[in-house]
Structure formats: structure tokens, C-alpha cells
Image (cartoon, rainbow, N blue to C red):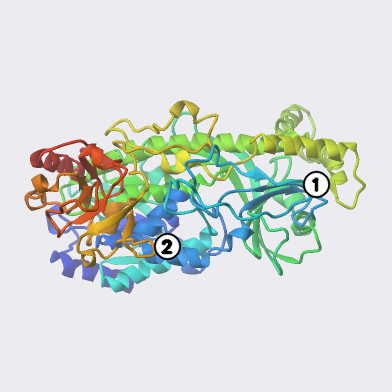
């Protein structure tokens, strides 16, 4: 490791033509960006910075052999898929290639076991995940299948798609490995020797030297790394967050529920296929997630101290539980059993308040209940917001980098708060399903409170708790398809199906939260799309508009002129490849560094803007008629027959795809707007 680190620093010194001495002066070295943690957020940031040719060093505490083994998150929502498609197209293609077929994960299944047949399955819900979300549908919630049906036909193509992408399903450890391979490939293809990823390198101490404006990171190996900016991507138990004395916001919940994550591999796929199985039997009530055809994770609630891993969940008991949950005589191997505490926490600040040059991303900044899949997605979208800021401010003074980190926090922290609230509502929806079969999650808590008051030994109280839990679950044996149907089974099946029919189950798509969030100003960021309906209509679709602070609505526009060969990342679609999606135009038109895009109806009067600005600006002309005169043929010209974009005269889009200006403007005004955004002041 020492030689690897020395070689890496040597390349930094050659690139920057500076010297590193024992007494570092701020004027003598331009330290790299250091990312701590090679989870999805850290690896994604490494990829995006490499795309912008910005040097970075990623440190991961675990050895490589332990990094890509355990499934955790698995759902990639619409916005995440867009970022992958337009920012990292090769990675996006690999994700699509590696994902399991949609028929394996478009269903949620409810029953006595995962292998319940049509007669034993209480309910099956199909979600419209095989197509992009449709703005015309009333609700993106799933549809319950008729009794006895296990499968249905694919979704009809959307009338008015909200996105160029449908959602994805890929186990986090598989996705992370693709991210790592992409980062290595970007490093090699760009010949960027100043970017590296080093494993087995836990950070033992972190110190900010104010005189030099340098972070000193001491590794457990004794090595010291110097950095001008540090990104903490080291997870929910972030050591860096604690080192910076950053706590959780008021209202955070650090212990919502205790679960065992049981990772198993089967010798054959579980049938019928589903992404999520809700299991109700006399041994357990749990959720099981299908990560691939032969890899699953069971999430089993347990209740310490009245249930312990050692006494109540030994290897033989776990095997018994898994066998009952899988059903059908499915053969399996238990890979790991890990306790886990569900939480909903938001960091009080995302920025190290001492240096103003340390920042939290991903789970280090926020943790959510898994229902709805917003944890990993919010983290990936955090770093998409952060990457262009780091790229533009990389060689700037510390105050400009600090401005960008402040903007990042002011925009992303409120989004995390909204997503945390949504995830908690989704957790309540999961509990609603249990209540439909007369299981109330509050009863174990109430029982624990009673047992806490009894003057009995812990062992005896544990025995009482176990017996009471067994008594509560005992009636569920009647759900076994081998048992004769009776009024109890019919009644709770009716309860469950009625709840799902009314849309009170767990949705999988949340259009407004995936694509409808916006940033409104430097200090106040809110989700603006129908805010009053967010709490009750979480899965409702919406009609996107061209609005300041929001993503440009997805449309397909025809190219009428322009030198297409000038744009390496242009996403041409259609049978004649003459159209492009309006999603993430800056990523499509960039040429190596973050760019701003200006859509303008009167391009002639703005033609000098590119020459007068020090930033990368791509001008795109919008015309209403195909025969319109194109005055600057070197620029891309797009046909907007609907007048949706043309009517605004000028639309300025920053590098992450969000609109920062609308309306007719002169060259100097636009130059000021872009300059302020590039300096982290807008």
C-alpha cells in the first residue's frame, strides 16, 4: 500500500508541478479531492469526477474481497436511470444488460410462503415498471391481479412519458461492482493518473489545518493523506460525520425497528417470481426481496432484549425459518445473517462547519426506511448535484468551493427530508398490510413495556415473550394451501385484497418524488409540485412544466440542423436518429467539463455570449417550424412545434439539468447568471 500511495502522490506532484514537504503550505500544493467510502455514492462520485477530468482519491476501509458480497438496496428509480443514461452511458448499458428480466421483478406477492401457488397466494400486485412512467395515468400504484392469477401481460406504452427511462432493479453489490469497473475504465480511457481507488484503507483520524487550509487524514496503516476537500461517503455510521461533530436533525429516529437481514442463495429460482414477497405464517412475518433469480434477502423483525441472536436465532432455527418462508422444498444456502436497525435520520448539516470544505453524501448524510427504495437513489442524486460543483470549483479559491458546498446542502437536505417522510409513510403502508391480517406492530412493543416492569429474570421474560409471539402467529397456519379453506382465511384474504385494491399497499413508483423535485433559491429548497397532495397522493403522476429550479420536462425534439459530430455524448433516438431527448441536455452536449446550455428562440442576438464567458456554454436554437431560417448553422437547432420551450425565448440549464433562468435576456444578464451559478452563488 505504501508504494502505491507514494506512486499516486508522485503523479499528483508531476501533474501540479508542486512540492510536498513535512510542513505543507497552502500555496505549495493543490491537494486532490479525497472521497472516503466506496459504496454506491462514493463510487458514483468518482465516476462523475473522472468524466469531468477532475482528480480524486477514493479510500475504502474494507478490502476489495469484502466489498461486493452482500445485497442491500436494489431499486434504481427513474431519475437515477436518467443520470446513468446521460452522464455515464457505458455504465447505463451495462446496468441494462445485467438487470434481471422485468418479468421477474414487476410483482409483489403476498402469501403463506414465497412459493405459494395460485390457490395459496393471497394476492399478487403488478407494477408498471416495464415502461417509463406515464403522466396521463391517474396513479402509478400497482394493480392487484384477479384471484388465482399469478401473471399478466406487459404494460401498454405510455401516452405521455415523464422520462426517457424506465426504472431498474439490480442488487446493490452487483451495481457497485459495475460502478467500480466503470471508474477503472474511465481512469484508463482518460489516462487520468491522478484518480485512484485504494481499498483496505480505514481512516483513523482527521484533522483540519486552518493555517494551510489542508485536511490531514491519518490512515490506520500510519500513512497520512493531505486534501483540500473531503467527501464523506462512509455510510450511516460515518466516522467522518462524527469527527466533524455533526449530529442528526430534531425529529430523526435512530431506532424504528430491529431486523435480521438473512442473505440466501437458492439452487433454483423461487416461483412465482416477484421483487418483494410479504410472508405470513405461524413461524414468522417478514419481507423477502428477490435480488436475482437465485439470490434473496429476508428481512425478519426481532425484538431485543426479549429476542437475541444467540438464544432465539441460532443456525438451526434460521434454517427452519428460511425453509418455511421459501416453501416448495426449495434448496438453499445461508450466506450471512446480519442484525440491522431501521432508522430515519437527516444530518443537521451536510458541511463541516470548521473548514467549510468537508461534505457528507449518501447514507452519511441521511438514512431512510427501505420501503420505496429512496436511500441509495437519494445518495446517487446527491453526488450528481455535487460533482459538477466540485468540477467547476476545483481550481478556484476555497471560498468558491465552500459556496458550492453550501448550495449543495441547501438544495439536497430538504429533498432528503421529503424522501425520509415519504419512506416513513411507506413503512406505515407495510404495517397496514400486517394489520389487514390482524397483526398489530404495536403489540410486541406494548408487551415489552409490560415485561420491563416485571421482577423476573431476563431469561424468564424472554420465554414469556416467545410464547406470546407464538400464540399471536398461530392462526396463520390456516393460510397454508394444504389446509382446508375456512371463514378465517377467507376473511383476512378479503381484508388484504380490499386494502390493496384501494391503493393502500406499498407503491413502487413515486413520480413526483423521482422526477418532480425542484430547487428554489440558495437557502430555501422545496418540492413544489402539488405540495399539498404529497402526503396523501404519493404515487400520483403529474404534468411537468418548464419552471425555474426544476428539471426540464422530458420531450423528444427533432434536430433540424447542427454539426452532430461535435457532440460525443448526444443521445440520438428514433428510427432515423434525428431526435434527442430534452433530459440532461448539458450532459449530452458537454465536451469534457461541466457546461451550461441555453435554449433560445432568437439565437442571433446571443451569439457573442460564448465568446464573452469563461465557462463552457452550449447554445441551442429552438424553432417552431422546420423551414425556419437557421442563422447559426454551427449550433444545434431543435424543432419545438408545441411552443412549450420556444415561448420562453431563453432557457438556461445548469450542468445537472435544472433550469436556472427563464425569459428574454441580453448577453450581459445571461453572462452574470451563469457566472453566479458557476461560483456557487445561484
Measured as percent of width and height from the top left, residue 203 is found at: 39, 56
Residue appearing at x 68%, y 37% in the figure: 501
Residue farthest right in this picture: 484
Quarter of the image where the N terminus is located: bottom left
The residue pinned by badge 2 equals 92
- Asked if 76 appears above or below 439 in the picture, the reply is below
Quarter of the image where the C terminus is located: top left
Residue appearing at x 57%, y 63% in the figure: 100
In space, the residues marked 2 and 1 are separated at their CA atoms by 40 Å
Residue farthest front in this picture: 627
Measured as percent of width and height from the top left, residue 94 is found at: 45, 67
- Residue density around tag 2, few if under 14, some if 14–19, many if 20 or more, within 10 Å: many
On the rendered structure, is 299 left or right of 574?
right
Residue appearing at x 69%, y 55% in the figure: 151
Q: Earlier in the sequence, mark 2 or mark 1?
A: 2
Q: Secondary structure at mark 2?
A: helix
> Number of marks in the image?
2
Q: Secondary structure at mark 1?
A: loop
Measured as percent of width and height from the top left, residue 346 is found at: 45, 37
Residue 281, numbered label: 1
Residue appearing at x 57%, y 58% in the figure: 71
Can residue 469 be seen here? The reply is yes
Q: Nearer the viewer, mark 2 or mark 1?
A: 2
Residue 504, numbered label: none
Q: 485 and 374: which one is in front?
A: 485
Amino acid at each position: 500500500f505504501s508504494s502505491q500511495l507514494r506512486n499516486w502522490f508522485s503523479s499528483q506532484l508531476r501533474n501540479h508541478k508542486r512540492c510536498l514537504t513535512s510542513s505543507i503550505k497552502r500555496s505549495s500544493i493543490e491537494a486532490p479531492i479525497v472521497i472516503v467510502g466506496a459504496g454506491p455514492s462514493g463510487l458514483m462520485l468518482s465516476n462523475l469526477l473522472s468524466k469531468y477530468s477532475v482528480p480524486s482519491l477514493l479510500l475504502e476501509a474494507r478490502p476489495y474481497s469484502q466489498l461486493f458480497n452482500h445485497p442491500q438496496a436494489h431499486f434504481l428509480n427513474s431519475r437515477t436511470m436518467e443520470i446513468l443514461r446521460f452522464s455515464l452511458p457505458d455504465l447505463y448499458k451495462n446496468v441494462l444488460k445485467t438487470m434481471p428480466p422485468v418479468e421477474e421483478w414487476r410483482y409483489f406477492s403476498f402469501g403463506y410462503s414465497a412459493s405459494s401457488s395460485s390457490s395459496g397466494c393471497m394476492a399478487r400486485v403488478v407494477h408498471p415498471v416495464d415502461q417509463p412512467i406515464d403522466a396521463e395515468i391517474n396513479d402509478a400504484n400497482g394493480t392487484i391481479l384477479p384471484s388465482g392469477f399469478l401473471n399478466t401481460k406487459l404494460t401498454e406504452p405510455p401516452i405521455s412519458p415523464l422520462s426517457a427511462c424506465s426504472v431498474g432493479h439490480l442488487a446493490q453489490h452487483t451495481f457497485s461492482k459495475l460502478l467500480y469497473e466503470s471508474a477503472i475504465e474511465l481512469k484508463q480511457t482518460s489516462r487520468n493518473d491522478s484518480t485512484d481507488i485504494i481499498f483496505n484503507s480505514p481512516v483513523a483520524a482527521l484533522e483540519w489545518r486552518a493555517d494551510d487550509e489542508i485536511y490531514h487524514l491519518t490512515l490506520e496503516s500510519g500513512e497520512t493523506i493531505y486534501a483540500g476537500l473531503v467527501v464523506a461517503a462512509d455510510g450511516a455510521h460515518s466516522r467522518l460525520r462524527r469527527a466533524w461533530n455533526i449530529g442528526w436533525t430534531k425529529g430523526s429516529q435512530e431506532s424504528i425497528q430491529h431486523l435480521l437481514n438473512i442473505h440466501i442463495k437458492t439452487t433454483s429460482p423461487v416461483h412465482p417470481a416477484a421483487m418483494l414477497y410479504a410472508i405470513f405464517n405461524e413461524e414468522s412475518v417478514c419481507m423477502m426481496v428477490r435480488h436475482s433469480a437465485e439470490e434473496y434477502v429476508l428481512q425478519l423483525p426481532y425484538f431485543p432484549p426479549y429476542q437475541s441472536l444467540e438464544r432465539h436465532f441460532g443456525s438451526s432455527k434460521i434454517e427452519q425459518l428460511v425453509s418455511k418462508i421459501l416453501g416448495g422444498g426449495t434448496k438453499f444456502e445461508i450466506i450471512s445473517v446480519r442484525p440491522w436497525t431501521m432508522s430515519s435520520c437527516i444530518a443537521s448539516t451536510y458541511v463541516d462547519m470548521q473548514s467549510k470544505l468537508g461534505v457528507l453524501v449518501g447514507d452519511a448524510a441521511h438514512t431512510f426506511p427501505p420501503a420505496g427504495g429512496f436511500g441509495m437513489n437519494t445518495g446517487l442524486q446527491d453526488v450528481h448535484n455535487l460533482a459538477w460543483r466540485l468540477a467547476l470549483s476545483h481550481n478556484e479559491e476555497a471560498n468558491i468551493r465552500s459556496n458550492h458546498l453550501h448550495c449543495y446542502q441547501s438544495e439536497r437536505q430538504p429533498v432528503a427530508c421529503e424522501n425520509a417522510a415519504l419512506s416513513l409513510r411507506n413503512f406505515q403502508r407495510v404495517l397496514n398490510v400486517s394489520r389487514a391480517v390482524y397483526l398489530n406492530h404495536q403489540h410486541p412493543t406494548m408487551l415489552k413495556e409490560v415485561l420491563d416492569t416485571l421482577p423476573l429474570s431476563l431469561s424468564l421474560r424472554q420465554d414469556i415473550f416467545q410464547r406470546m409471539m407464538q400464540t399471536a402467529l398461530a392462526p396463520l397456519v390456516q393460510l397454508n394451501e394444504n389446509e382446508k379453506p375456512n371463514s378465517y382465511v377467507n376473511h383476512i384474504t378479503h381484508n388484504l385484497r380490499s386494502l390493496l385494491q384501494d391503493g393502500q399497499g406499498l407503491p413502487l413508483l413515486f413520480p413526483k418524488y423521482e422526477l418532480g423535485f425542484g430547487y428554489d433559491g440558495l437557502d430555501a429548497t422545496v418540492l413544489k409540485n402539488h405540495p399539498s397532495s404529497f402526503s396523501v397522493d404519493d404515487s400520483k403522476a403529474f404534468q411537468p412544466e418548464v419552471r425555474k429550479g426544476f428539471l426540464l420536462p422530458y420531450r423528444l425534439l427533432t434536430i433540424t440542423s447542427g454539426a452532430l459530430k461535435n457532440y460525443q455524448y448526444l443521445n440520438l433516438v428514433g428510427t432515423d436518429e434525428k431526435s434527442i431527448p430534452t433530459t440532461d441536455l448539458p450532459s449530452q452536449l458537454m465536451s469534457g467539463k461541466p457546461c451550461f446550455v441555453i435554449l433560445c428562440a432568437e439565437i442571433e442576438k446571443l451569439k457573442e455570449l460564448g465568446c464573452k464567458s469563461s465557462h463552457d456554454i452550449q447554445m441551442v436554437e429552438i424553432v417552431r417550424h422546420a423551414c425556419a431560417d437557421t442563422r447559426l448553422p454551427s449550433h444545434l437547432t431543435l424543432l419545438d412545434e408545441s411552443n412549450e420551450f420556444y415561448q420562453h425565448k431563453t432557457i438556461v440549464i445548469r450542468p445537472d439539468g435544472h433550469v436556472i433562468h427563464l425569459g428574454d435576456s441580453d448577453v450581459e444578464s445571461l453572462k452574470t447568471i451563469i457566472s453566479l451559478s458557476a461560483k456557487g452563488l445561484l
